[in-house]
Image: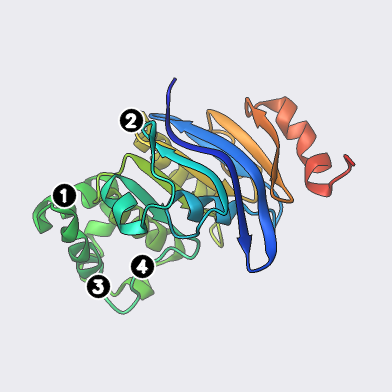
């Protein structure tokens, strides 16, 4: 499969501290790639570089084979890159309906956006007039996903979808993510807890100290290696 999103030899820093050391990673259309690793490994920075939110010091970012290195976040968003950050990113003081209304900038009507959101997440239809901040954590994450899908993304970047949620809720959310990928979207998912995402991932990459230590099939072999990779037993 040809890559829809690709990072080639990307280095990135926070201030004077380099956090990504030549990372190369790709995601094809219809594929779910799980990006795993301990806290502080640089996983979120990869997503932010891919969305144009954080600059790469060197290396290249490609979208559909086209070099978009240095492109502004708004330009990448219009080209189909959607980042759903850690913490869900909904407006807690607005209603569910008004959170969705804000996505009409993407060119769809309010009715179209609500149809997409409420078809995929029926529970939100019953909460349409409710203030987003009063939703459960899982419902807020559904709303964040619904907002992102309103932009009709080609690439979906998800950061710690499982954070603070019960395993049953996480499982249902990842079932939706798998369905999104089946519609041809390239999905890159950052997770600290591998068990949450490996069941739906096509490939997995493990990031340790800003370097990809392993990429490949997300099967039992990877699961057996994770503890050693996370703990840094390899020197």
The quadrant of the picture occupied by the C terminus is top right
Q: Is residue 16 left or right of residue 92?
A: right
Task: Give the camera-side residue of 171 and 202.
Answer: 202
Residue 25 image-quadrant placement: top right
Of badges 1 and 2, the one in the foreground is: 2
Of badges 3 and 2, the one in the foreground is: 2
Write the residue at 56% across / 62% down.
Answer: 164
Tag on residue 115?
Answer: 1
Task: Give the camera-side residue of 205 and 191.
Answer: 205
| Marks 4 and 2, how far apart at CA | 25 Å
Residue 57 drawn above or below residue 140: above
| Marks 1 and 4, how far apart at CA | 19 Å
Tag on residue 95?
Answer: 3
Of badges 1 and 4, the one in the foreground is: 4
The answer to whether one can see residue 175 in this image is no
Q: Earlier in the sequence, mark 1 or mark 4?
A: 4
Q: Earlier in the sequence, mark 1 or mark 2?
A: 1
Q: Secondary structure at mark 3?
A: loop
Q: Which residue is mark 2?
A: 184
Mark 1 and mark 3 in contact (Cβ < 8 Å)? no
Residue 117 drawn above or below residue 129: above
| Marks 3 and 2, how far apart at CA | 30 Å
The quadrant of the picture occupied by the N terminus is top left
Q: Earlier in the sequence, mark 4 or mark 2?
A: 4
Q: Secondary structure at mark 4?
A: loop
Q: Secondary structure at mark 2?
A: loop
Q: Earlier in the sequence, mark 3 or mark 2?
A: 3
In the picture as drawn, the residue positioned furthest to the bottom comes out as: 93
Write the residue at 63% across / 69% down.
Answer: 15
Q: Which residue is mark 4?
A: 90
The answer to whether one can see residue 84 in this image is yes
| Marks 3 and 1, how far apart at CA | 16 Å
């Amino acid at each position: 499969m040809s890559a829809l999103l690709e990072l080639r030899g990307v280095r990135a820093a926070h201030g004077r501290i380099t956090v990504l050391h030549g990372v190369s990673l790709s995601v094809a259309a219809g594929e779910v790639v799980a990006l795993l690793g301990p806290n502080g490994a640089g996983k979120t920075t990869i997503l932010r570089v891919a969305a144009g939110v954080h600059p790469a010091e060197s290396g290249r970012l490609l979208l559909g084979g086209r070099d978009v290195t240095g492109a502004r976040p708004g330009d990448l968003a219009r080209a189909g890159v959607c980042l759903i950050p850690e913490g869900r990113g909904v407006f807690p003081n607005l209603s569910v309906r008004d959170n969705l209304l804000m996505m009409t900038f993407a060119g769809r009507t309010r009715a179209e956006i609500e149809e997409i959101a409420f078809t995929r997440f029926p529970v939100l239809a019953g909460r349409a007039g409710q203030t987003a901040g009063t939703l459960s954590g899982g419902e807020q994450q559904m709303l964040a996903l619904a907002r992102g899908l309103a932009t009709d993304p080609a690439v979906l970047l998800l950061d710690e979808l499982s954070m603070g949620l019960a395993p049953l809720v996480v499982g249902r959310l990842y079932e939706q993510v798998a369905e999104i990928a089946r519609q041809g979207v390239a999905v890159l998912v950052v997770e600290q807890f591998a068990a949450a995402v490996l069941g739906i991932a096509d490939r997995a990459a493990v990031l340790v100290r800003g370097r990809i230590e392993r990429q490949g099939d997300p099967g039992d072999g990877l699961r057996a290696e994770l503890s050693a990779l996370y703990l840094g037993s390899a020197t």
